[in-house]
Every structure is written in C-alpha cells, then in structure tokens.
Amino acid sequence: CGEYVLFLDPDDYYDPRLVQNLCGAAEHYDADLVIGGLTTVGRDGKKQSCAISYEQVFRSQERMKELLFHTVGSPPEERLDSKYGVSACGRLYRLEVIRRGRIRFLSERQMISEDLIFNIDFLQHAKSAVVTADAFYFYCTNAGSLSKRHREDRFEKDIALWMAVEERL
C-alpha cells in the first residue's frame, strides 16, 4: 500500500539506517529503484562489504541498459559475477512500476535465481535508478539454502535460467 517495496530474506538482517537511506535516495533522485550495497556475513561471523565506493545515478535509456547488463553479469575486471548483484533483497522498488509492468516473482522451485528474472523485468520498465555506497543489508551465507544446496536438477534449472535471461534480453 506504500510507494515503495523492500524485500528482506528471513535469514538476513539489516541496519535500521537501511530504510531511511534507501528512501532518502529514492526521494532525492526521484528514482524507481535504489540499490544499496550489502555486507556478506560468513558462518563464522566474518563480514565483507560488497558495496561500491560512490553513488551512481542512472537516468538515460543508455545508462539504464548499462545497469541492466551489469546486473546480469559483470566486466572481466569486476571481482563478482554481477557488478550490481542479482538479489532483490536490500533494494527499494517503486510499487507503481511493479504494478504497471505486472512484474511478479517466479517460484524458486520453478526458476533458479528468480531474483535475477524479477530484476530484469523491473529494469525493463524502470526509468531511473540509483546505486548507493552504503552496505546496511547483511546477507548471511547459508550452505543449506535452496540456492546453495545440492540439487539433482541443477543443470536443467541453470539452462532454464539462461533461456529466460536470453528471452528477456
């Protein structure tokens, strides 16, 4: 019922400043999407920030395309598979864009990396985005999570993901 949607995984946690910072950036830049950095938390409690060092604003069609492609993958010089990450968690989405584009999550049992598909669909309807330099979302690594544990159908699910990404791009 609000203006924005924020997704949080139940096994993660966040700093109370997360919502204030994301909403502040959304309002300041009139952004449809605000991507905050995240901090990974290992099983041993060790933390590692995965945030960019400066704020980036995406407004033009060309810049939004760049954000889309760097969400799907990253240039060789990046240390991560995706420059801006694929998770929907810790991001602030304008609800009107979700409604207008009829954007929905696929089931995680139907499609591996359903967050990536959601983000691709959202970015194809969004007109602006901001990537913030904060890292107030804490992603807790969990070897037993659905995305990390062994799956007999992993190869088939990866092919389905590849086909869904190719179809959208």
Image: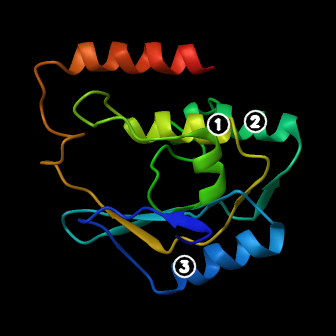
Other-residue count near label 2 (Cα within 10 Å), few / some / many at <14 / 14–19 / ≥20? few
3D distance between C-alphas at marks 1 and 3: 24 Å
Where residue 101 sits in the image (x, y, percent)? 62, 40
- Residue type highlighted by circle 1: His
| Residue bearing mark 3 | 19
Is residue 143 or residue 96 the one in the foreground? 96
3D distance between C-alphas at marks 2 and 1: 6 Å
Q: Helix, strand or loop at disc 2?
A: helix
Residue, x 54% and y 79% (percent of image)? 19
Is label 2 in contact with label 1 (beta carbons under 8 Å)? yes
Marked residue nearer the N-terminal end (2 or 3): 3
Is residue 95 or residue 11 the one in the foreground? 95
Where residue 131 sits in the image (x, y, percent)? 69, 59
User: In the drawing, what numbered circle is on residue 66?
Assistant: 2
Residue, x 27% and y 37% (percent of image)? 108
| Residue bearing mark 1 | 70
> In the rendered image, is residue 94 in sight?
no
